[in-house]
Amino acid sequence: MNIRKFKRNMRLWRPQLIYLLSDKETEVRELLKEQVAQKYLLKKYVEPYYEKHKAEIIDGEQKIYKTCWIYWRQGLENAPDIVKICVSSIKKAFQKIGWDINILDIDAVKRLCDFPEYIWLKYEQGIIPEAQFSDLVRLQLLVNYGGCWVDSTVLIKESDDLESLFKEQLFVFRNLGANKEYINISNWMIYSQKNNHIVKDVRDILFEYWRKENVLIEYYLFHIVFKLVSDRYGSVWGKLSMYNNTAPHMLQGELFNEYSQSKMDAIDKQTFIHKLYWKVPKKVAKGTFYEVIMSDEIRS
C-alpha cells in the first residue's frame, strides 16, 4: 500500500476508531456512528456514482401526482389498532382533496416494485432488514409513479392545508435542529413527482449499496445518503420550502402520558400531521393521549 492510499484509509477509519474507543454519552456515540457511515458511503458509493452520473437539474414541471402510498407488510387487516386508526385518518385526509389511495401489502409491492433480483433475494434472506426494505419500497414507488408516501403510523387531523404541501416537486419534513450534520430530513412522509432526480439518485445509490453489501452500516442509511445527494443539488435543494419535523413528533413524545386538552390544543396549533409509532406496551394507563386517540371521539 502506497503512502497516499494509507493516509486516505486512515482518514476514513479514524472516526470509527474514535467511536470504538469513546466513552461519551449515547448521543455523541450516535453522532460518531453517523460520521463513520457518512464517510464510508461518500467514498465508496456517492462519489463513484457522481463520477459516472451528472447531478441533473430538476425541471420545472408543475403536475401534481395525486396518489397516496401506504404500506403494511402483513396487510392492514393484520395491523395493530393504532395503525388502523392512523391509516383511516390518512385516507380521510387524502380523499378529501381527491387523491387515489393505495394501501399495499407485500404481495402488492411485488406487483408494483420492479426491484433487481438481488434486492428480493437479500430481503428474503434477512440481509436487508424490514425498515430498510420499506425505504426501498417508497423510493421505487415515487420514482416510478410519483405521489406521496405516508408511513402507516402517521395521524393526520382535519385541515385545509394538506394539498399546499405538494405545490413543489419534492416535499419532506426537514431536520432543522442542532443535530443536522449527517441527517437533514425525515422520510416518513415524502411527496415527489415521478422521476425526481434527488429521489432517483438516492434509490440508485442504495441499490448499489445492497448489490455489494451484506451488512447494514447504519440504521439511518437512507437519511445519510439523502443528505449526501441533496448536497449535490445545492441551490435546487435550497430553493425548496422547508417544513420542520419537530412539531410532528411532539404528540409521539406524549403518547403514553396523561391526557391534557390544553396540551393537545397547543400541539394541534403547530401541526395537523403527527408521526406516531405502532409498538404499544401491553398495559397502557387510563387517561393517556393514546387512549384518547384510540377513542371513538377521535376516530370519528
Image: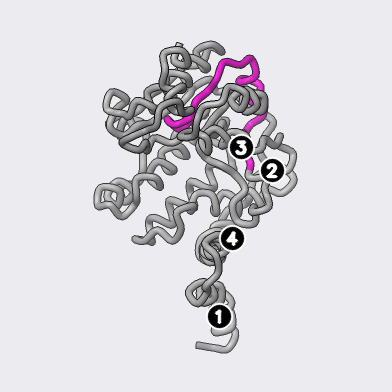
The 10 Å Cα crowd at callout 4, few under 14, some 14 to 19, many 20 or more, is few
Q: Along the polypeptide, which appears first: circle 2 or circle 3?
A: 3
What secondary structure is marked by label 4?
helix
Which residue lies at the image location 50% right of the left edge and 77% below the top edge? Answer: 21
Across and down, in percent, residue 8 comes to 58, 78
Marks 1 and 4 close (CB-CB < 8 Å): no
Gap in angstroms between the C-alphas marked 2 and 3: 13 Å
Inspect the image, locate mark 1, and give the three-letter code of the amino acid beneath it: Met
Classify the position of the C terminus by image quarter.
top left
Residue where numbered disc 4 is placed: 51
- For the residues carrying marks 4 and 3, which lies nearer the camera in this image? 3
Q: Along the polypeptide, which appears first: circle 1 or circle 4?
A: 1
Which residue lies at the image location 57% right of the left edge and 27% below the top edge? Answer: 273
Q: Quadrant of residue 181?
A: bottom right
Where 60 sits versus 57, above or below? above
The answer to if 95 sits in the magenta stretch is no
Q: Nearer the viewer, residue 75 or 30?
A: 30
Inspect the image, locate mark 4, and give the three-letter code of the amino acid beneath it: Glu
